[in-house]
Image: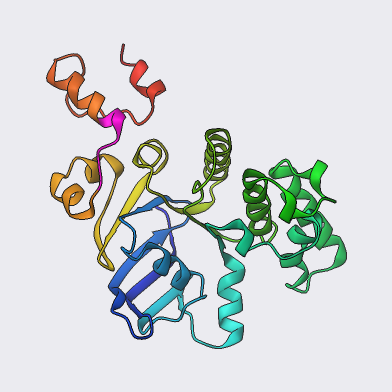
Amino acid sequence: MRETILEVSHLSYLYEGEHEALHDVSVSIKRGEQIAVIGSNGAGKSTFFLNLNGVLTPKEGAVIYEGQAVGRSRKELNRLREHVGIVFQDADSQIIASTVYQEAAFGPMNLGLSREEVKERTDRALRYMDLEAMKDRPPHYLSGGEKKRVSIADILAMKPEVIIFDEPTASLDPVNTAMLEEVLVKLGKEGRTLLVSTHDVDFVYRWAERVLVFEGGRILADGAPEEIFRDSQVLKKAHLKKPVLLEVTEFLVRKGLLGEGLYPHTVEELQKYF
């Protein structure tokens, strides 16, 4: 039984002068879960993430990390941000240093770690993201995919318990999108707790073990991918479409070529039935 690592309780958030971006959101996140967060633009996904990471402070409700509600003191917020890292959609908004190495080292240095520990964490993060050959290059002159790798190395060097990816494939080409998915799969196999927002329902279906659907600042649905994408009412309300593989699976079931109740999440899994 997985333990709860992070949760929000009756969380609401209001941007100044606007309607509530989040309203009475409650959800628990288990250690090691791979969660996709989906919904149309403006549904509340990014606001939810920024509250989880302590960048935003909720109007009502609480963020709870390892059983302890996070207060508003700098010490408590810094502890939350140390353990819950976020990779922003726009890599340029996250990158601040003059070299790739300095960028990856920035977070560990601000944790007050020893020089040896900072170096070990930074070197490991750069190896993980295959950035060692670029460590002395200015990150702002890298390609979009390379910048994304740097922004992920930033977070990995912090060694957070939970990693949040806000629209990580936005503006990436197919090659870099595939690279990012490989990284997410690798992190998942290592037991990392991952939350990823995306509009790519095919990726969600093959990668996630749990899906949160946001609509109008609320959680509309919470369940396994096959449960979410087979619910026509949820799809209609959240303006979502079915993953292609699920449509193929349902077609094969109707034709009697695949047994009822089988929901392969990848092409490789589907091929095993034939």
Figure quadrant of residue 129: top right
Figure quadrant of residue 117: bottom right
- Residue 59 is at least partly visible in this image: yes
Q: Is residue 259 magenta?
A: no
Please name the colour scheme applied to the rendered image: rainbow
Between 230 and 39, the one nearer to me in the picture: 39
Give x and y (percent) for residue 7.
40, 68
- Residue 67 is at least partly visible in this image: no
Q: Residue furthest front?
A: 141
Figure quadrant of residue 92: bottom right
Magenta span covers which residues?
Answer: 240-246
Give x and y (percent) for residue 22.
31, 73
Classify 205 as above or below 274.
below
Left or right side of 56 for 90: right
Between 220 and 172, the one nearer to me in the picture: 172
Give x and y (percent) for residue 97.
76, 64
Classify 143 as above or below 67.
above
Left or right side of 15 for 145: right
Between 264 and 132, the one nearer to me in the picture: 132
Left or right side of 220 for 108: right
Q: Residue furthest top?
A: 274
- At a point 44% along the width and 65% down the height, the residue shown is 49
- At a point 24% along the width and 42% down the height, the residue shown is 229
Q: How many marks?
A: 0
* The C terminus: image quadrant: top left
Left or right side of 151 for 124: right
Between 90 and 206, the one nearer to me in the picture: 90
Classify 13 as above or below 73.
above
Give x and y (percent) for residue 196.
45, 52
Classify 161 as above or below 15.
above
